[in-house]
Every structure is written in C-alpha cells, then in structure tokens.
C-alpha cells in the first residue's frame, strides 16, 4: 500500500507529458489503494462474519488479480512514456514494486486460505 501511495505521489507531483497515460496510472493506483484499505477494514473489524453471503477469500483474490494486471499494464505504459523525467520514472518503478508485492499477496492469500484448508492443518 505504501509503494502505491509513493507511486501516486511521484506521478502526481511530476510534470506530465501525456495526460491520458498518467491519469490512467493515477486512477489504477488510487482504486487499488482504496480497495486494499476496504479489505483491511473488513479483516480488522471482522465484517466478513456479518456478511456471509460474500465469499471474502474469492473477492480478495479477484481484487488482487484484476488490480495487479491493471497495475502492471499502467506501470508498463507509464515507464514507456516517462521520457526520463525522474518523478515519472520513480512512479513507474514503485508501480512495478507494488505489482510484485500484489503478486506476493495473492500467493500468500492462496497459500493460507486454500492449502491449509485442503490439508486440514492450521498453524
């Protein structure tokens, strides 16, 4: 979440050369930030116990999967259009870092929710 915030601030404080590219990057970063915050609130306040009609592991998996793909696309486009402007390069770099961290989060969520439930072991 911090790497997404740094990427957003870096792109926002730079001089843009291509409005559509960087506004897309900012929208993707902010949507990911908000959705990650929503899932944190759901887990912290245990809202998932009240809303049993939603499969929370599946919703979190789909969010991370779609958000990671969109963030990867936005980072690639931002890196290709940065024209060596340091703020835009930093934003794209932190976007790639956030993509890697989202992939790790997907893997850890899968590992915790699917593998431990299928073996019946809880650590």
Image (tube, rainbow, N blue to C red):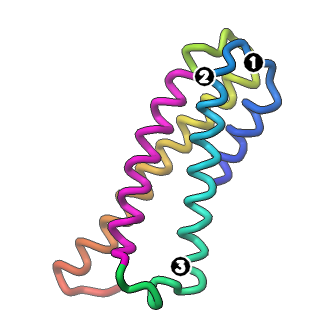
Q: CA distance from mark 2 to mark 3?
A: 33 Å
Mark number, residue 43: 3
Magenta stretch contains residue 72:
yes
**Which quadrant: the N terminus?**
bottom right
Q: Quadrant of residue 41?
A: bottom right
Q: Quadrant of residue 6?
A: top right
According to the picture, the residue beneath numbered tag 2 turns out to be 21
Q: Nearer the viewer, residue 109 or 121?
A: 109
Name the residue located 40 percent from the left edge and 47 percent from the top edge.
Answer: 66
Residue 15: x %, y % from top left: 80, 19
Name the residue located 39 percent from the left edge and 74 percent from the top edge.
Answer: 56
Residue 2: x %, y % from top left: 68, 52
Residue 37: x %, y % from top left: 62, 64
- In magenta, the rendered stretch is 54-78
Q: Main secondary structure of the magenta part?
A: helix
According to the picture, the residue beneath numbered tag 1 turns out to be 16
Looking at the image, do the residues carrying marks 1 and 2 touch, with CB atoms under 8 Å apart? Answer: yes
Name the residue located 58 percent from the left edge and 67 percent from the top edge.
Answer: 38
Label whose residue precedes the other's in the sequence (1 or 3): 1
Residue 81 horizontal side relative to residue 65, left or right? right
Magenta stretch contains residue 118:
no
Q: Quadrant of residue 78?
A: top right
Q: CA distance from mark 1 to mark 2?
A: 9 Å
How many neighbours does mark 1 have within 10 angstroms: few (below 14), some (14-19), or many (20 or more)? some
| SS of the residue under disc 3 | helix
Looking at the image, do the residues carrying marks 1 and 3 touch, with CB atoms under 8 Å apart? Answer: no
Residue 63: x %, y % from top left: 43, 56
């Amino acid at each position: 979440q911090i790497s997404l915030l740094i990427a957003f601030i870096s792109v926002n404080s730079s001089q843009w050369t291509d409005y559509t590219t960087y506004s897309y990057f900012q929208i993707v970063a902010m949507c990911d930030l908000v959705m990650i915050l929503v899932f944190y609130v759901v887990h912290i306040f245990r809202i998932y116990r009240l809303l049993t009609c939603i499969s929370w592991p599946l919703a979190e998996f789909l969010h991370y999967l779609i958000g990671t793909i969109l963030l990867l696309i936005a980072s690639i486009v931002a890196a290709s259009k940065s024209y060596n402007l340091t703020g835009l390069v930093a934003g794209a770099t932190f976007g790639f870092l956030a993509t890697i961290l989202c992939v790790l989060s997907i893997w850890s969520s899968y590992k915790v929710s699917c593998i431990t439930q299928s073996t019946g072991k809880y650590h």
